[in-house]
Amino acid sequence: MAIGARNLGISGAILGALTLSLALPVLADEGDKPADTVQAQSPRSEGRTRVYGSSTTYFLGRQVLDPNDPTSRLFQMPMYQYLTMGADDVGVPGFSIHMSGWGRLVPFHQAGERSVAGDLLIGTVTYTHPRNLVTVRAGRQILYESAGNNTMMDGVYVRVRPKIPLEISAFGGWVPYQGSDFDLDRTVFGGRIAYRPWQFGNIGVSYTGQRADGQFDRSNLGVDYSFRYFRQVEFAGYVLVDLVSASFQETSNSLTYLLGRDWRFTLNYGMYDPSGRIPKTSIFSVFTDADYHKVGADVAYYGSGWLGANLYGRYYHYEDDDHGYEVGLRPILRFDGAGAGSSVGLEVARLKGFQNAYTQARVFAAYRPEAFRRLLVTADINNYFYDDAVLGWDVWRRMDPSGVTPYRHTGDGGYKRSHVVSLTAGCDLGKGARLQGDVAVHVNPDFTQAWSGLLKFQYEFDTFVK
C-alpha cells in the first residue's frame, strides 16, 4: 500500500501524537521506580496501564529491472520503517489502543516507484469487558472471521460471549483503498455465531458480504469447526461457499494425532478455487478460474535431544485431469538439544505441477557460540533442478532484445537450475534491541546473478504506568 507525502504526513502525525501521549507518562513513572519493578507488576491486579511498542528499520540493497530498459538493471537502497504502538487498560480496565504503520524511502533509482511512501496499516480503539463478555473494536482492522478471508476494514467489530455456550459477532464498515483513501460504496459487513458447549470443540456459521460499484465483490457463507479428543486427537477445518456464483469455494481440514510429546501425525485435505479470493469487480478474476484438490500427510518428530525430522507429502488434482505431487524430507541435527542453539539441517523435496517439475536440495545451518549467546549466524543454500528448462524474463530478453518473438516460459536456451545462497548475522544488543545483517545472491532465469543485502534494527519495549 503506497501513498503520497501528504497522506504519509497524516499517518505520521497520528503515530507521533500517540507516541508522545504514551511516552510522557512512561518517562514520568520510570523515574519513580526501577525498570525491573515497573515491568514485574500486573496492570490488572494493580490497576495500571501497560504500554508497548516496537520499531523495526530495514536498510535494503537490491537489483531491479529498469522500466525504461528491461535489458538492464538498477541498484536500489530503499529504507523501510515499521512502527507499532499501543496501550492496554488506558483509563479504565479493558480499554486499549493499538496502531501500526510503515514508511518507505527510495533515495535514488526509484524505477517508477514513489520516492516516499507509507501507510497506517492498523489503528484501533478496543474495549473488552473484564470477564471477556463483550468486545468492541473500532478503526482500521483485519477481519479473521471464518468467512472474512482476512479482509481489511475501516469500521466496527462487536463480539458477545454470554454466559450460555454461544459466541456472537458482527461487523460493518468500508474497505479502504491503498493510501488510506476510501469510497463509501466499498462496504463490507457480516457476522458469526458459534456454539461452544465444551472446552474441546466448537462449530460456527459465518457470513461476509463486500460490495463495490453497486454489486457484490464477495458474498461468502462459511462453516468452521474444531474438535479435540483428550489431548491426543485434534480435528479442525472450515467450508466456504460463494453465494455470488452459487458455487463451492474452498475447504480445508486437518486431523492430527499426538503420540507423546515427540511425535505428530497429520492428515489434511483441501479444495481451493483461487478466483474466490479475488474481488468479482477485479479484472484478475477473469484469468484464474480453475480449482484444485490437495491431499497430504505429515510425520514430524520433535524430540528433546539432538535429532528432529519432518516427512511430508502432498497430492494435487487440477482441472482437466492434471495431476501433481510434492514429497519431502527435512531432518535437523541440534547440537544444543531442543534449545535455540546451533543446528544443521538438510531438505530434499520433489514438486510436480501440471506444467513443470523440480527437485529441491537444501542445506541450512545456525550457529550460536557458547561464549557469546547473543550472537546468531545462519547460512542457507537452496537449489532447484527443473525437469524442463525455464527461460525467464532475463533469458528471453537476452535472446531477443527487440522483443519480437512472444515470451515463452519454458523452451530451448533456458536454465535448468536456480539457486539461492544467503547468510545472516544477528546480535541482541540489549533488552528488546537487536541488530541483524543479511546478504543473499539469487541465480535464476529472471536474474542470472542478483545480489541483495539487508540491515535490520529492531527495538521492542513493554512497561507499566499508572
Image: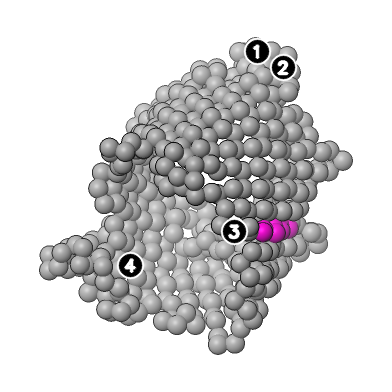
Kind of residue indicated by mark 2:
Thr
- Tell me how far mark 2 sits from mark 3, CA to CA: 60 Å
Kind of residue indicated by mark 1:
Asp
User: What is the number of the mark on residue 405?
Assistant: 2
Question: Among all residues in the image, which is located at the extreme left?
Answer: 32
User: What is the number of the mark on residue 260?
Assistant: 3
Q: Secondary structure at mark 2?
A: loop
Kind of residue indicated by mark 4:
Ala
The residue positioned 42% from the left and 47% from the top of the image is 339
List x then y, in percent, for residue 445.
Answer: 61, 21
- Tell me how far mark 3 sits from mark 1, CA to CA: 60 Å
Kind of residue indicated by mark 3:
Gly
Q: Nearer the viewer, residue 131 or 2?
A: 131
Which quadrant of the figure has residue 310?
A: top right
The residue positioned 38% from the left and 64% from the top of the image is 98
Label 1: which residue? 400
Mark 2 vs mark 4: in front: 4
